[in-house]
Image (tube, helix red, strand yellow):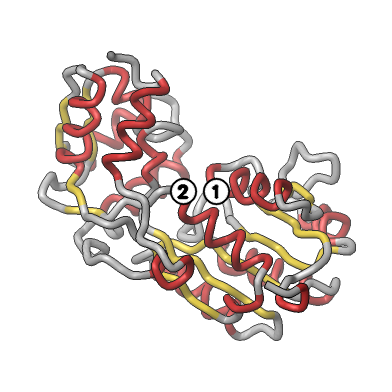
Amino acid sequence: MTNEHWIKGITLVIGGTGKTGRRVADRLLKAGRQVRIGSRSAEIPFDWEQQDTWDRALQNVKAVYVAYQPDLAVPGALETVEALFDRAIASGVEKLVLLSGRGEVEAEEAERALQKTSADWTILRSSWFFQNFSESFFLDPILAGQVALPVMGSVAEPFVDVDDIADIAYAALTDVQHSRQLYEITGSKALTFPEAIDEIARATGQKITFVPIPADDYRAELVRQGVPDDYIELVLYLFSTVLDGRNTPLADGVQRALGRPPRNFADYVRQTAASGIWGGK
C-alpha cells in the first residue's frame, strides 16, 4: 500500500481505556502512529460531560475514534456527539470513526448526524461483545455460577469479538478505502444466552446456569447492589429492545471491511478459559 492511501496526523481515541478503545490505540501505536488517549485520566483529559476539555484534546488531531460512554441510547447522547462532531471538524479533524450499536434507534440517529457532516466518516454498527462475558457485565455472575438476566432464553444474539471491531477501526483510521462506509458487525453465529453460558461452562468444567428472570426482579437486584438509577434504566432498555430478536440475523461487516470471516465464539471461549479468568480447569 502506498503512502498516499494512509491518513496522517494525531489520532484521538475517545474511550481509549475501554474495551474497544484500548485495542484500537494499541494497534495504532504498534504501527507507529501518533495517538492521544481520550479519557478523564489522560495527560490531556477528555470528558464527555465537560466540554471545556474538548478543544485541548482535539488540538492538532486529524482523526478521531468515537466510543460514547455509557451508550448512545442514553438521553442527551445525540446532542453531545453532534456537538463533538462540530467541534472536531472546526478544529481541523478530517476523519471520524463512530462505534455504534446495532438495533438501537438512538444510535442510528447519531449515525445520521455524522453522515450529514463535512468530515470523512466510517461507522461501526456492532453487536454485543464476546468480552462482555469476561471483562465486565457477566463476569461476576459467571464466577458465581449463575447468570440471571431479563432476556428470553430463546433469543439469539450474534456476539462479536472486540478484536474484530478494533481491527476494522484501525483500518478505517489509517486507510482511505474505508471512507464513508457503514459496517454492520456481527460474529459468525447467533447464540442464545443459555448456549453461550453452556459453552463457557464446558470449557471451564464448572457448573454455570442461565436463568431468565422478570425485568422487575432484575431491577430490584440492581437496586439492592447500589447500581445508579440511570444505569439501571439503560440496561433494562437494552435488554427489552436490542435483545428482542431484532439483531439475530448475521451481517457481513467483518468480511467487507477485512476480507476475512469474523472470529468465532468457540475460539474466544477456549482462549479465555485457558487464561484462568473464569476459574475452573
Quadrant of the image occupied by residue 186: bottom left
What residue would you read off at disc 1? 20
Q: Can the viewer see residue 256 in this picture?
A: yes
Amino acid type, mark 2:
Val
How would you rate the neighbour count of disc 1 (Cα within 10 Å): few for under 14, some for 14-19, many for 20 or more? many
Residue 183 locus on image (x, y percent)? 45, 71
| Residue 95, x across and y down, in percent | 70, 73
Q: Is residue 241 above or below residue 6?
A: above
As rendered, which of 15 and 34 lies closer to the eye? Answer: 34
- Residue at which label 2 appears: 162
Give yes or no for contact between labels 1 and 2 (Cβ–Cβ under 8 Å): yes
Where does the C terminus fall, quadrant-wise?
Answer: top left
Name which residue type carries label 1. Thr
Q: Position of residue 123 (x, y in %)?
A: 53, 71
Side of 77 relative to 135 (left or right): right
- Pick the residue in front: 165 or 147: 165
Residue at 56% over, 68% down: 78
**Residue at the spot 22% in from the left edge and 66% down from the top edge:** 249
In the rendered view, tell whether residue 265 sits above or below residue 61. above
Q: Which residue is drawn at 29% across and 50% down?
A: 239
Q: In which quadrant of the rendered image does the N terminus lie?
A: bottom right
Res 51 → quadrant: bottom right
Q: Which of marks 1 and 2 is nearer the N terminus?
A: 1
In the picture provided, is 144 more to the left or to the right than 271?
Answer: left
Residues 262 and 118: in front is 262
